Amino acid sequence: MSDLEPTFSTRPRLLVSVRGPDEALTALRAGADLIDAKDPERGALGALPTETVRAIVAGLDGRAVTSAVAGDGTGTAIAAAIAAMAATGVELIKIAVGAADDATLAEAAARAPGRVIGVLFAEDGVSGASFPARLAAAGFVGAMIDTRGKSGTALPSLLTTPQLAAFLAACRTQGLMSGLAGSLGLADIPELAPLRPDYLGFRGGLCLNGDRRQALDGARVARAVTAIRNDARADAA
């Protein structure tokens, strides 16, 4: 099975968001599975310059799966943003999709076939299977839930466990890679890992002082890796 396919397994993989090549190497050395390029100074889905993403990809040299944010979906040139990010060589591309119509979604997915992940914001609510079905029909490869606000309110405070489980089940039904993110910390792993997302995504919870604008802390990344693996072993026992 490719690392880019849904795992449908008992252990999520760890997604760590980074803002440059040095942080990418920190995440790699600490055991991150997917290294995600985004600008923490620009909100939940702030895109880094394409030259920075290209440098991250080059520095990792195929040693981890890579993704990058193409934007928060509020502009009118979603497809063009995806095409520009695809040219960096990053494997997966994330874009907010909540307000996009079906034609826009299909155009966006067509710019990087098999590589585009749609991100939904928890604050907007998640209506069961409808979004995963729309994304799959448009040609997206995955779907994630994140939080628009980054003031410390974590995903489990905005959506219930049954809501998250229904979203993940819909992703599995549609054959989509799935992910959960949004101001997550180590304490959220025991609650979210048993829901079996393909990825759990972190930024602030793995940075110095828990501040997403500060540097990534390799020791915290390593603790997250261990926590996810230990949770999977406990679940299998």
Image: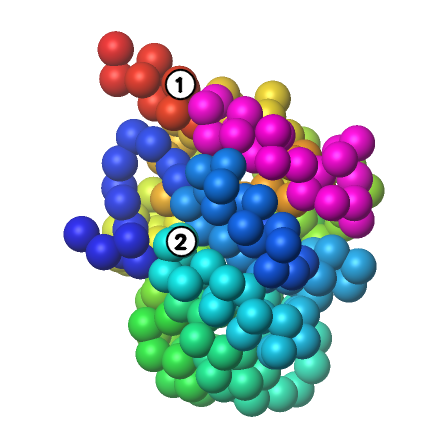
Tell me the colour scheme of the image. rainbow
Determine whether 199 is above or below 42 in the image: above
Determine whether 147 is above or below 38 in the image: above
The answer to whether mark 1 and mark 2 are in CB contact below 8 A is: no
Determine whether 142 is above or below 198 in the image: below
Please name the residue that numbered disc 1 is placed on: 230
Mark 1 or 2: the one toward you: 2
Q: What's the amino acid at mark 1? A: Asn
Instruction: Identify which residue is drawn at 47% across, 30% down.
Output: 225
Whole-percent x, y for residue 85 in the image:
53, 78
- Residue 26's disc number: none
In the rendered structure, which segment of residues is drawn in magenta?
Answer: 207-227
65 left or right, relative to 58: left
Quadrant of image for the C terminus: top left
Please name the residue that numbered disc 2 is placed on: 64
Mark closer to the chain start, 1 or 2: 2
